[in-house]
Image: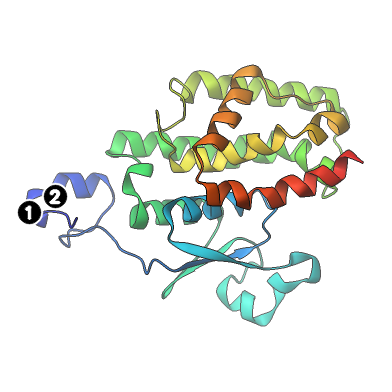
Amino acid sequence: QAPEPCHHNVQRFAAMGVACSGQQPSGTGKVVIYGLSLSGNVMPPMLFILDNKCGSMEEMNIMTGEHKSPEKLALNPFGAMPIMKDGDIILAESNAILRYLAKCYNPTSYGLDIKEQSNTDWALDWAATTFLSKHYANIWYPVAGFGAAPANQEDANKACVESLEVFVKKFLAGKFIGGNTLNIADYKIGSAVWYLEHPAIEKNSKYKNPQRISQYAKDFYAALSPESQKFLEGPKFFLDTKLK
């Protein structure tokens, strides 16, 4: 259903970051994500797209340097993934893509007002600057074979647990960051801790999610659409190979 005329909704649209045009931003409904399906940066926007039935993925094999091809560098000159294309809108960086997708395809997944949106932004930025770069990277990447193990794995595991326990106190008053339904920060963080639940992580790094995070990861997976759960079969299979 189309929104009411703009003059009736100025405050609501302004809080949601929507221009005063009488309607919320709209995409083509045919979003394309270029990336590698097992990537923790690709998974969040891809899961959102599958849950909201607004696009698909085209594999971009970074192992063969496809992300550095002239065609892909024309889309993202930084040569990284994911890349998103929705009509004439091109974006990179997982968090930026998630915000765009929410505004176009499911505004409530960003937040109903500026307070909820700000909380979502805080969680997204915490994930980028603290959890993923300082903790997740010391656990998932070495197990996956994409990075060296930290000098002291036990200390790295402890630091990750402590950071996640603070995250729980700050952001998980409800089932999810978004309360009873997934918001875009849940797609970012939930997919990462879902990955850390895989038995190959504990086998190879001795890391184990704290109990509340383990439940959060299970709840996150259960809340996904069948299409998203099927998509995660690929990343799961990849880590299955690390059990051998």
- Looking at the picture, tell me which residue is in the foreground, 142 or 151: 142
Looking at the image, residue 196 sits to the left or right of residue 47; the answer is right
Would residue 31 appear left or right of 1 to someone viewing this image? right
Provide the residue designation for mark 2: 10
**Residue lying at 69% horizontally and 22% vertically, measured from the top left:** 161
Q: Which residue in the protein does label 1 denote?
A: 7
**Residue furthest front as drawn:** 226
Q: Where is residue 222 in the image (x, y as percent from the top left)?
A: 54, 35
- Around disc 2, counting alpha carbons within 10 Å, would you say few (fewer than 14), some (14 to 19), or many (20 or more)? some
Report whether residue 170 is seen.
yes
* Quarter of the figure that contains the C terminus: top right
Residue furthest out toward the bottom: 70
Q: What residue type is labelled 1?
A: His
Residue 127, can we see it? no
For marks 1 and 2, give the CA distance: 6 Å
The crowding category of the residue bearing disc 1, from other C-alpha atoms within 10 Å (few below 14, some 14 to 19, many at least 20), is few
Which residue of the protein is positioned furthest toward the right in this rendering? 244
Can you say which quadrant of the picture contains the N terminus?
bottom left
Q: In this view, does 98 lie above or below 152?
A: below
CB atoms at circles 1 and 2 under 8 Å apart? Answer: yes
Give, as a three-letter code, the residue at label 2. Answer: Val
For the point 33% across and 40% down, the residue is 111
Q: Which residue lies at the image location 46% right of the left edge and 25% below the top edge? A: 175
